[in-house]
Amino acid sequence: MSNAATIERPAPSGASRSSGMARRMKNGGISLLWALAGVGLVVIMWELVKWLGNYIPMPFNTSDMTMPHVWTMVAAMGEPEVRGSENTVLDAVISAALRSLMLAVGGFIIGVAVGLLLAVIMQRFLFAERGLLPFVIASQTVPLIALAPLIVGIGNRIEIGPVKWTTTYSVMFIAAYLAFFPLSVGALRGLQAPSPTSLELMRSYAASPGQTTRKLRFPSSIPYLVPALKVSAAAAVVGTVVAEISTGVRGGIGRLLIEYARQITSQPAKVYVAVFGAIALGLLVAALVTALDVYLTRNLPKEKNA
Amino acid sequence: MTITTSNLAVEATGVWKVFNEGQANEVTALQDVNLSVDTGEFISLIGPSGCGKSTLLRVIADLTEATRGEMKVAGHTPHEAREQQLYGMAFQQAALFEWRTVRRNVELPLELQGWDKDKRKDRAMELLDMVQLADFAEHRPWELSGGMQQRVAIARSLAVDPTILLMDEPFGALDEMTRERMQNELLRIRKETGKSIIFVTHSIPEAVYLSDRVVVMSPRPGRITDIVPVPLGDARDEDTREADEFFDAVTAVREALRGHVGGAGARAKVGEV
């Protein structure tokens, strides 16, 4: 067939996949170098500002009390968390961050599930979109600080058999509460994205609404879903940290931040270590979502997920 | 007429389609359409934009409902015909799902009908073989040229082995050379499968080259104004495009179109009745 000659035959998929993987790893290595260079630049700027503060007046306090040296912060990581304890500050921050990570991921998963479900319902039934969407939007205008004690208060009365509601659940609930919104709005747009022709095609095949959702709407929603997942993940992390602070739940990075902030006069470097912990937590979640992104978009043309 | 109802692929009797009926923005898309398409016949619907040719196809396909009149598709209501997959459809956009391989695109209608995996695959490969794209079965649609994508769409429309093929300007977005090659391809497929085909097009030569009869339509209100038979027989090839009979038929269709396009203003009043 003469048409067959008009496009080059690509290499067998196995080979193209492995070369793609190698390229991705190489690109990953370069990005890592850039990221490290960025961190280095921030360190240099930080110290430069501190040093300049000794000679020219700065609009903010550059003393060691508010802006400790980078090496003081690194040293603070190795100090015992409380006097005489074997646990270092770094140990405490890592374990707190991991605990918060669990809560954030839990909240994210619940939020994604709820968000998707709402999006499907809103797409399927116009009255649901009209009726639910205002509530979905309104839900995000309630200040979190007002919500947290409410959820703890209501939650504490919940007891289903052997399972008793704890403040941990409240934290997860709040994370999910923030995470579901960007996802449901993004997923709704995605589910409505298929072209009229594709929808008519499904109709001509006498496909059921469920089949149309599964075989057409879900796959076409992925380009919309991916950015929504990123925003949701970030919301889940912020929700977790803020919820830990406002509910006073112990063991997480939010609570640690507050505790260390109280010690700022004696050990100003300590609070920065906790901040780094929070940042690392955010980056870890972002990495998880990126992995999810790569998985979801594996079958789509590459220029689309660039 | 010796033809019984069951021998007709499509039978339209007094079909009307009126949008926004009774309102200020009322549009008569189809006015009193009567049309019989024999089983195995190739019919083209031709006419300027707004003449209702796509609407007529959509009524046949049960993508929209006739306001008045009766439509029979292979002896059934359009709804039954759709539910029983008696027709396959191809659009101007190939509308392939980009997340599926070429083969899995062809399998889609079978998947929806609950065919099992192996049978699905065999059938899809058989069809891809027919449109000469078997080598591209595991490729993604975006790796294919426009003409190749359209051939996949045709293979997909044939997947459930429908008796009727409905095609809405399937070659409209292709360049002239690809288009002529696709026309030959379609005639070959038609010969191999014996499908009844209803083909919407803007192109007079395309309609003449492909069809047994060309249905000429006119806008405001959309209606059939002429049905031009094409006496070119079944054996058509590149030489046919240069034959006198071909040009005669092209002229006949062109005159049928011109005769009505010119008087559109005067006819608009008739449509208001």
Image: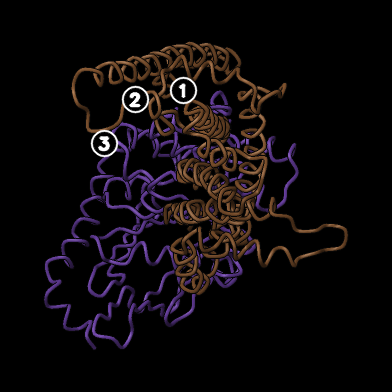
Chain colours: A brown, B purple
Tag 1 or tag 2, which sits nearer the N-term? 1
**Snapshot quadrant of residue A291:** top right
Question: In this orientation, which residue lies closer to the viewer: A232 or B8?
Answer: A232
Between circles 3 and 2, the one closer to the viewer is 2
Q: Mark 3 points at which residue?
A: B242
| Disc 3: host chain | B
Q: Name the residue under label 1.
A: A1
Measured as percent of width and height from the top left, residue B185 is found at 45, 36
**In this rendering, would A195 be left or right of B85?**
left
Q: Which SS class for mark 1? A: loop
For the residues tagged 3 and 2, is the chain the same? no
Reply above or below: B152 against A69.
below
Reply above or below: B221 against A16.
below
Between circles 1 and 3, the one closer to the viewer is 1
Question: In this orientation, which residue lies closer to the viewer: B46 or A248?
Answer: A248
Residue at 46% from the left image edge and 14% from the top image edge: A71
- Looking at the rendered image, the quarter that the C terminus of chain B falls into is bottom left
Separation (CA) of disc 3 from disc 2: 92 Å
Question: In this orientation, which residue lies closer to the viewer: A69 or B272?
Answer: A69
Separation (CA) of disc 1 from disc 3: 24 Å
Separation (CA) of disc 2 from disc 1: 77 Å
Q: Mark 2 points at which residue?
A: A63
Task: For label 2, count other residues whose C-alpha is less than 10 Å away and answer few (under 14), some (14-19) or many (20+).
Answer: few
Task: For label 3, count other residues whose C-alpha is less than 10 Å away and answer few (under 14), some (14-19) or many (20+).
Answer: few
Between circles 2 and 1, the one closer to the viewer is 2
Residue at 16% from the left image edge and 83% from the top image edge: B269
Identify the amino acid type marked 1.
Answer: Met
Measured as percent of width and height from the top left, residue B71 is found at 49, 74
Residue at 63% from the left image edge and 51% from the top image edge: A171
Identify the amino acid type marked 2.
Answer: Ser
